[in-house]
Image: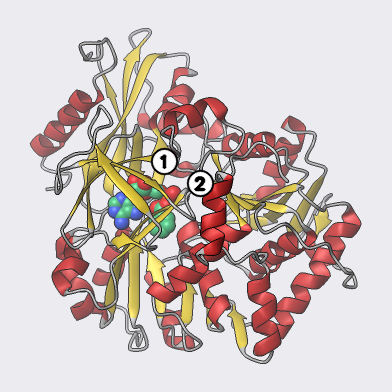
Amino acid sequence: MLDGWVPWPDAVAERYRAEGFWEGRPLDRLLRDRAERDPERTALVDAQGARWTYAELDARADRRAAGLRRLGIGAGDRVVVQLPNTDAFVVLFFALLRAGAVPVLTLPAHRESEIVHVAETSGAKAYAIPDTHDHFDHRALARAVRKAVPGVEHVLVAGDPAEFTALDEVDADPVPLPVPDPSDVAVLLMSGGTTGKPKLIPRTHDDYAYNVRASAEVCGFDSSTVYLVVLPTAHNFALACPGLLGTLLVGGTVVLSPTPSPEDAFALIERERVTVTAVVPPIALLWLDAVEWEEADLSSLRLLQVGGSKLGAEPAARVRPALGCALQQVFGMAEGLLNYTRLDDPPELVAGTQGRPMSPADEIRVVDEDGHDVPPGGTGELLTRGPYTLRGYYRAPEHNARSFTEDGFYRTGDLVRVLPSGHLVVEGRAKDQINRGGDKISAEELENHLLAHPAVHDAAVVGMPDATMGERTCAYLVLRGETAPTQRELAAFLTERGVAAYKLPDRVEVADAFPRTSVGKIDKKELGRRIAARLRAEGSGAG
Ligand code: OOB
């Protein structure tokens, strides 16, 4: 067993097994089983049109797993994976599971600050990257990571490896491999984060397999499903809700889009007759507009899943008329709980709610600031536990004491209200995080980086309304001296520190002092109101 994670209490685990939520099978079996049943079906298609059958994908994963073992990567070893939407991701994901190793999934946009932290926290033995992606040389990043975290013995590169190891050369003839314990951790996902450093989320074989299986059922995935991966493959939404894994589970076809742009995605929808895809609201908005000028034939599309941040009721109602497909709202989290609007829900619930819990075993509570349940229909913080919601972050006992109740409910930090139908409406947030169109930014993490700037005496990061992104990031600064760094200077400073580009402040405001609450904390609500008022006065913002 991997150490440093919090398993479900024995009695609870027993119940999840007895009730059939946990099937006791390693996660990689979903590919093996399908390859045995439908070897010749197309499992995977990439943007260039390369295609792999289930048998081919399965065999590639076996060869890579054997090669990983030969390199010395095996049972319980953590491997930081940072690969874009390519077949290399899919093959490596299954190969790591088969080798008994634990993929630590990061986004292509992450940089030194994030990668060093997760490599360190997870105690990673290897780091898998593309050679370059999006005009960025990941081998240069790997050099910095190796320097900072010497435990990272191997850098595995898709493409030109420079001084490192080419993924393609890792392969070896398949060997028999030990079968992992299904109740053990299968993958580590990154949390959006509310603290100084991102946290890792342990997901077991049992819990993640259930996440995938139940999602596929709720979303009506079957062998006719052609799923387009638009968000990063490493994002829980695109990976497992039902995503790429859910599609492979039921024998459908996964198509990989390099970017979410209408040019890339629409062309692939037309070429591969894509039936379903998942996007964040800003992409949905972009697509709703792009159908006006893009010529592509989208008639194969049956379902658009939208989640990651709140979709407005107005764009929600435009999905069917503009794109000719059904909408499904998804309110999910890498920590576990998934809420889906159902395919047969009435239009007002689909447009006006963020769905209801996926599983009959999901337990939810809505509580006030003192932790007491609010009256039915009232707004409060959502707490949850269930067969696929974590009981603790990886190697984070202090943080866990705050993020979970004593009886194991995860405090989501989301403010919701529950309708009589059981559907949830997300009303806001109780956590110190900015949700920038689905990308999560921990205010504290960004503030710590800003405080390292010589001109900055104090920093407070808040969200500001934005018509497209829902929110953008505003950094309020109290200066040490007279001269304020410009937004561009700050961006350069943060980039130099290895902060991912999506976390850079969209706006910088200087204050003489921060407003304080009665207990002396920075009053972020007041700062949020100030910037919103200022945007209104400037005639921009949510409008
Ligand atoms: C998804 O996962 P994460 O881990 O990036 O972020 C989770 C948080 C939630 O706690 C909530 O604050 C926000 O993102 N969120 C939404 C939302 N979906 C997620 N807020 C409002 N409306 C929604 N529909 O974002 C994620 C994981 C799996 C599936 C879908 C999204």
> Where is residue 492 shown, x and y percent of the image?
48, 32
Type of residue at label 1? Answer: Tyr
Type of residue at label 2? Answer: Leu
Closest to the observer: 167 or 346? Answer: 346
> Where is residue 38 shown, x and y percent of the image?
65, 90
**484 left or right of 241?**
left
Figure check: 526 above or below 269: above
Q: Are marks 2 and 1 in contact (CB under 8 Å)?
A: yes
| Residue 512 visible within the image | yes
Residue for point 79% across, 71% down:
62
Of mark 2 and mark 1, the one earlier in the sequence is 2
Most distant residue in the bottom direction: 40
State which quadrant residue 477 falls in: top left
Residue tagged 1: 410
Closest to the observer: 473 or 70? Answer: 70
Residue tagged 2: 390
Q: Secondary structure at mark 2?
A: loop
Distance Cα–Cα, label 2 vs label 1: 7 Å
**109 left or right of 55?**
left
Residue for point 43% across, 37% down:
407
Closest to the observer: 399 or 312? Answer: 399
Question: How busy is the neighbourhood of tag 2: few (under 14 within 10 Å), some, or many (20 plus)?
Answer: many
